[in-house]
Image (spheres, grey):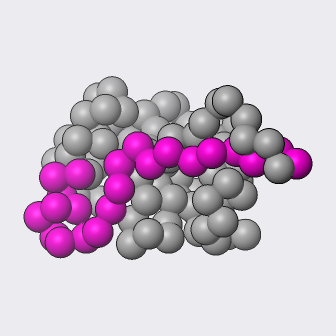
Amino acid sequence: MEVHNNLGAGFLEIVYKDALEWEFRRAGIPFEREKEYLVNYKGFILPHKFYADFVIYDKIILEVKGVSAISDEFIAQGINYLKVSQNQLALIVNFGELKLNTKRIVL
């Protein structure tokens, strides 16, 4: 909320990610940015990798968007990140709307 209250809507996603990183550091919240995940298919590691925007407290996937609405495609992306990470909670946060919009995904 702090980032959205200060920046509002309309910036590129990277701006919100930078601001979130600054807020996480200031608050002492442990996180990894652009965390890489490998995809294991039947014991074979596929060449394409997933990169989660943030992993917070080593267990919460945070995906940052700057679009007009959270689509089913972004929800599917969150579910896939949960599968490859073996985490149970993903948050999609969309800064592209006038009011901050979030979607919580639990596996």
x, y percent for residue 66:
43, 34
Residue lying at the far front in this picture: please name it: 43
x, y percent for residue 68:
51, 31
39 or 68, which is in the foreground? 39
Q: Is residue 102 visible?
A: no
Q: Which contiguous range is marked in magenta?
A: 21-42
x, y percent for residue 82:
65, 59
Q: Residue at x 23, y 51 (%)?
A: 21
Residue lying at the far right in this picture: please name it: 42
73 or 60, which is in the foreground? 60
Q: Residue at x 35, y 49 (%)?
A: 33
**Tag count in the figure?**
0
Q: Quadrant of the C terminus?
A: bottom right
x, y percent for residue 6:
16, 48
Q: Residue at x 51, y 59 (%)?
A: 61
The quarter of the picture where residue 8 lies is: top left
Q: Quadrant of the N terminus?
A: bottom left
69 or 107, which is in the foreground? 107
Q: Is 32 contained in the magenta span? A: yes
Q: Is residue 17 visible?
A: yes
Using the image, determine if residue 12 lies above or below residue 85.
above
Using the image, determine if residue 78 lies above or below residue 88.
above
Using the image, determine if residue 34 lies above or below residue 106.
above
The quarter of the picture where residue 46 lies is: top right
Q: Residue at x 83, y 50 (%)?
A: 43
Q: Is 8 contained in the magenta span? A: no
